[in-house]
Amino acid sequence: MKEKALSADEVMRILEETRARDYSYDRFFSTMCTQPHPIAVRAHDMFLETNLGDPGLFPGVADLEQRVVQMLGEMLGCPNAAGYISTGGTESNIQAIRAARNEAGKKNGNIVVPESAHFSFDKIGDLLCLEVRKAELDESLKVDVGSVESQVDDNTVALVGIAGTTEFGQVDPIEDLAKIAVDRGIHLHVDAAFGGFVLPFLEGDWRWDFRVPGVSSITIDPHKMGMSTIPAGGLLFRGQDCLSALETETHYLTKARQASLTGTRSGAVAAATYAVMMHLGQEGFREMVRHCMDLTHHLVSSARQIGVEPVIEPIMNVVALQVPSTAKVREELMKRDWHVSMTREPRRALRLILMNHVTEENIDLFLQDLQTILQR
């Protein structure tokens, strides 16, 4: 920190120069986040200084958070769900497994997750002193139920299924996992950080949420396909008992007990999420998902015209394209200012997310560059 103050104009000039170094969403194919809806930005600014960690001082925004939890619960098949707005999928996953561990009360516990699980579960194993057992995937890149069953034992405190895997957008057989969970009396957590705001608005009857008996908790991120501001995650439990397993006494705050992982929590993101959900409604989200799926289908059909196939037929707006020498191709694309990522071995592929900020024009330009690189 400097001894003497800088003028506000000088500080803003530094910030503007620094912000200009950030890349533009226009050419992002690698991120599951997107530009927030304008009404989310307005709501965020309105509640900027509010703190959900001390709700008695901010009863208005605390009420908004509960309204969001109720709306999310209704969307996911459980109007009476309990939960809160977290900082994102990692925190929600940590808290879901922590609740499961606390309820089970077992030492030397383990969790069984798919090989396709988000890397947050590796953090969870470290933080919560749990063994993370990774079940194999089948040919369609869903978790293999037989592999899950083979790894469950008396010390298993939770099973995890993914509804919209980070790399392939695949949906695990949640109903089959739920049968195992119910039979063994094990907590089943569904990580739908990305898919939570996609699957409810896709055609077809996707059964992966609280409508499936045995699903205990769900992660869903409003700051992804929910069009909210960052950091807005969501953690829902089927009932209050699981949430209560996370509570600790807060002796000097306006509420006696607190279940969230973080103490101070931004009320602004809860307000932003409420604003988007109320403004768009199911109709608006359905239209947005349809638009993203149209982009997805356009990408896949156009890629096929240049001889490039997806690893699997996309379930949602996540596409993995099979190309030779994937790492080198990605490097060349990045040189042309296309921001793409890769999936892990053994299914190494270019990973693209077709978010609302993507345009058909940029898809076509991207594929032109990809074709040029592949023909070298």
Image: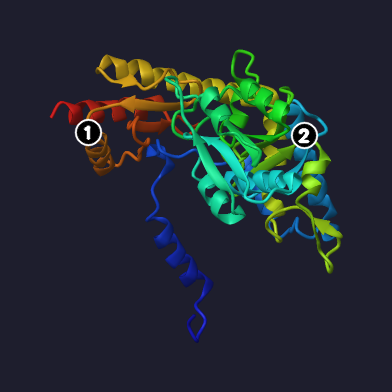
The number of numbered discs placed on residues in the rendered structure image is 2
Task: Examine the image and state in which quarter residue 205 appears.
Answer: top right
Q: Which residue in the structure is indicated by mark 2?
A: 238
Looking at the rendered image, the quarter that the C terminus falls into is top left
Mark 2: few/some/many CA within 10 Å (<14, 14-19, 20+): many
Q: Residue at x 24, y 43 (%)?
A: 335
Say which of 120 and 102 sits in front: 102
Say whether residue 360 is left or right of residue 185.
left
Mark 2 element type = loop
Q: Is residue 248 positioned above or below 74 on the image?
A: below
Q: Is residue 270 visible?
A: no
Q: Residue at x 61, y 53 (%)?
A: 128
Say which of 309 and 59 sits in front: 309
Say whether residue 247 is left or right of residue 196.
right
Identify the amino acid type marked 2.
Arg
Mark 1 element type = loop
Say whether residue 211 is left or right of residue 320.
right
Mark 2 and mark 1 lie on one chain; the one further toward the N terminus is 2
Q: Position of residue 191 (x, y in %)?
A: 60, 35
Q: Which residue in the structure is indicated by mark 1?
A: 325
Identify the amino acid type marked 1.
Ser
Q: Is residue 130 positioned above or below 325 on the image?
A: below
Q: Position of residue 193 (x, y in %)?
A: 59, 37
Q: Residue at x 53, y 23 (%)?
A: 146
Q: Residue furthest left?
A: 376
Say whether residue 238 is left or right of residue 150.
right
Q: Residue furthest bottom?
A: 3
**On residue 352, which mark appears?**
none
Task: Examine the image and state in which quarter residue 284 appears.
Answer: top right
Q: Position of residue 280 (x, y in %)?
A: 67, 30
Q: Position of residue 352 (x, y in %)?
A: 40, 32
Work out how far the residue at label 2 is from the one at label 1, CA to CA, in angstroms.
45 Å
